[in-house]
Image: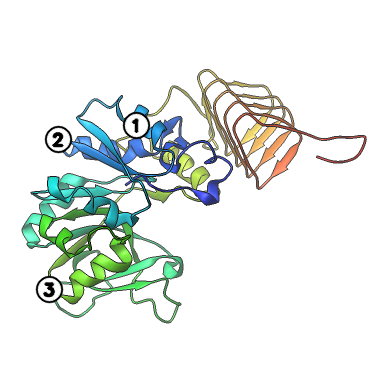
Amino acid sequence: MAGGRGTRLMPLTKNRPKPMVPVLGRPVIDYVKDAMVDAGLEEIVVTTGYQGEQLISHVNSWRIPSRVNQEDTPMGTAGSVKLLSGELSETFVVGSGDSVASFDIKDLLNAHRSSGAKVTMALWKVDDPTEFGIVGLSSEHLGEIDSSLTEGFISKFKEKPTVEEAFSNLINAGLYIIEPEVMDLVPEGEKYDFSKQLFPDVLQRGWPMYAKTVNGIWFDVGHPFELHKAQMALIENRDVLPFPMPEGEVLPDGSFISESAMVSGHISRSVILDGASVNGAAVNSVVMANSRINGVSESSIVGEDTIIDSRILNCVIADKSHIVIDLENEKR
């Protein structure tokens, strides 16, 4: 699924769909694609609507049979997959194209088959579940919730619970294994959502649903701070995660400097990507390809081919921008 507009990442997503936002120099969609390839899946279909042309060009470069299904109007997560229901005649995998996660899809498939579930969901454990949709698990189908479980049958869903309502700290991680008959529950031609509409319906009908918690990392990179945290986590866990690292140097504080980047200034907890340069300072920032920091970037995401001749703080800067201070008028 690659239909996200990435509004919280604007203006980075003004000229690219959210799944094409770079993470360590690679489009974020490639991380779930790699997990699918590693699991031995034979074909990938990317569903999208927003700025799909870039995705078509990128998906055509994958070394696995792949194609993009472009929606004329937004159909929601389940509605977009429903458009393909004529092709879904056996167990299939649905993944979010805008998250970075260490999904072991083979393991999830084994759990799905052993449990006899109609749907199996990947979960992630969080400290604060109040901003997410939480999932309650039971050791048996239609059983009582046991909050100590990290794997089991799904007994209950709750969207964005209060602290008092939170019966679990396990959240939907955006990867599902689904049997084809489940898609018969999705209305034809309607916008329809997996987590808010389809899965509660499946549960209400008493169909078995299973879930298992993911190990390693999980980030939804729809927020600028998460985009920075995801890249720092990938660098920190580079020896144990199944993702390729670009060529470059990792500093003791966890910063990364691409092999083709140039740094003569100060960097701290930052990622400096291909062809970028830092002559001033980059602190808790991501500096994308071919950008120049002559001023200071702090807690910011700097798009590609951009020049910073100022001090920026908590900013997302578009590609091909030039940020300066007008000293005469004391304006930026």
Identify the image's colour scheme: rainbow, by chain, secondary structure or one colour: rainbow
The residue tagged with tag 1: helix, strand or loop? Answer: helix
Q: Does residue 2 sit above or below 302 in this rendering?
A: below
The residue tagged with tag 3: helix, strand or loop? Answer: loop
What residue is drawn where x is 6% and y is 58%? 114
134 sits left or right of 120 in the view: right
Q: Does residue 316 sit above or below 65 in this rendering?
A: below
90 sits left or right of 104 in the view: left
| x then y, percent, for residue 310 | 76, 35
| x then y, percent, for residue 115 | 9, 62
Can residue 137 be seen in this snapshot? no
Q: Does residue 73 sit above or below 13 in this rendering?
A: below
The answer for how far apart the CA atoms under marks 2 and 1 are is 18 Å
In this figure, which residue is indicated by the disc labeled 3?
A: 141
Q: Amino acid at mark 1?
A: Ile
The answer for how far apart the CA atoms under marks 2 and 3 are is 31 Å
Question: Contact, CB < 8 Å: mark 3 with mark 1?
Answer: no
Q: Amino acid at mark 2?
A: Glu
Please state the total of marks drawn on the protein image: 3
Front-most of residues 165 and 328: 328
Q: Quadrant of the C terminus?
A: top right
In this figure, which residue is indicated by the disc labeled 1?
A: 56
